[in-house]
Image (tube, coloured by chain):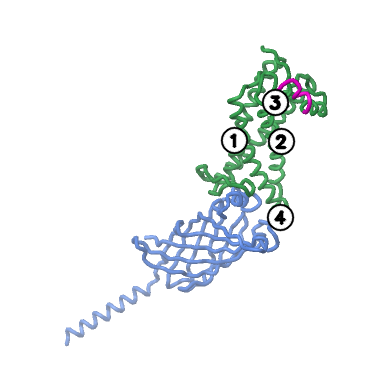
Chain colours: A blue, B green
Amino acid sequence: MMKSAFKKNVFAAALVAGSMAVGQPAFADTYTIDPRHSFVEFVISHLGFSLMQGNFNDLSGSFEYDPKKPNEANVSVVIKTKSVDTNDAERDKHIRNEDFLHVDKFPEATFTSTKATLDEKGGKLEGKLTLHGVTKPITINVNAIGAGDDPWGGYRRGYLGETTIKRSDFDMRYNLGPLADEVKLRLFIEGIKKK
Amino acid sequence: MEGENPASVLYSILILNFQDSALRINNSDDYFGIVSASLHWSNALLILFLFGLGAYMTELSYMHPNYTFSYTVHKSLGILVFELGVLQILWAWISHRPAHLAAHRWWEKLAATIVHRIFFFMIVLIPLSGYAISSAEGKGVEFFDWYAIPALLPQIENQADIAGKIHYYLAYGTLALVLLHITAALKHQFIERDGTISRMLCIRVPNPKQ
């Protein structure tokens, strides 16, 4: 009788201790963006008749995420503008020059989050986008794709972020027709948890 | 036989050229033959047109009605100049090379030889650098709607931008030499009246052995 009561108490104490440990302020995990599984895709109207799609292939950065405090998440991404790729060498050369991205002068575009409104499924991420030397606030709709252990001993977390910007807001006014000011951006971001 | 004015030059080609001999296909010391002359003049016209078209099209906006067609024509004719240029170089190599006109001074002969050699390099390098722009990401370059030259060059980083700069500077550098070439030829033909242009029109310009 005594023995079992003791056992129970120990078990209860262990439970309390365990729950206390869980309740303690956990530090958010930092994730490094995996450049081989992260892309920024853009879609723009071609003359109003169809859509033109391209990618920025070279991006890097990191994010911090704590599943218990998703609203404290923060993200920073750096995109190498010369990595623009629309599957056409002449068009890419044109997009890199002064008419558009002017990559010699503005080699990087950056996004830094300022406010997260997230849950496990996603939500909204507000932040500052610097592109073509102009910084503007944007809001990204975030869709959490999944998270878990990968087959190689790491832990990954992936998102799809979507937003729409106007080229004119970022001082890129080269005339491509009235419908081609708006650019839809899709950010495919996969992070590997830092150990 | 050297022409006094364009009309008499034309008259010479049409009539006098063929009075004293059979068709002048190969070169001699007195004239350039039909093969050399036709390659020279067709490339001359194509190249001058391509200089102008290149300068024009790169200033066009995307929405301009001539935008896409200008690039198609520039690339296609560039391919043609490359092909004709290779023929021209091969023909210059295997055919008889006319001696410099005896009346020319030594430094004129030297300068002419250097400039002609540079032209032969440029007629290959400028089209190649243009081809390197268009084919930088693995796509071929089309000759109108007829055929395409596949992307064969090994691809390097920033290829389109680097090749674009090379294409630009080689073209403008060569344009300066072309203007020198034309000016010198006109001076020799019309001021010194030594038949420099005449013999590139297959007209016999007696050139005694030196």
Q: Residue at x 70, y 46 (%)?
A: B57
Return the residue at label 3: B23
Task: Provide the chain ID for the residue under circle 1.
Answer: B
Q: How far apart are marks 1 and 4 (CA)?
A: 31 Å
Bounds of the magenta segment:
B14-23
Label pair 2/4, CB-CB below 8 angstroms: no
* Relative vertical location of residue A132 with respect to residue B16 in this rendering, above or below: below
Q: Is the magenta stretch mostly helix, strand or loop?
A: loop
* Secondary structure at numbered mark 4: loop
Return the residue at label 1: B125
Label pair 1/4, CB-CB below 8 angstroms: no
Return the residue at label 2: B45
Mark toward the viewer: 1 or 4 = 1
Return the residue at label 4: B63
Hey, what amino acid is under mark 4?
Met
* Secondary structure at numbered mark 3: loop
Mark toward the viewer: 2 or 3 = 3
Residue B15 appears in the figure:
yes
Label pair 2/3, CB-CB below 8 angstroms: no
* Relative vertical location of residue B204 with respect to residue A82 in this rendering, above or below: above
Q: How far apart are marks 2 and 1 (CA)?
A: 18 Å
Q: Of B102 and A158, which appears nearest the observer? A: B102
Hey, what amino acid is under mark 1?
Leu
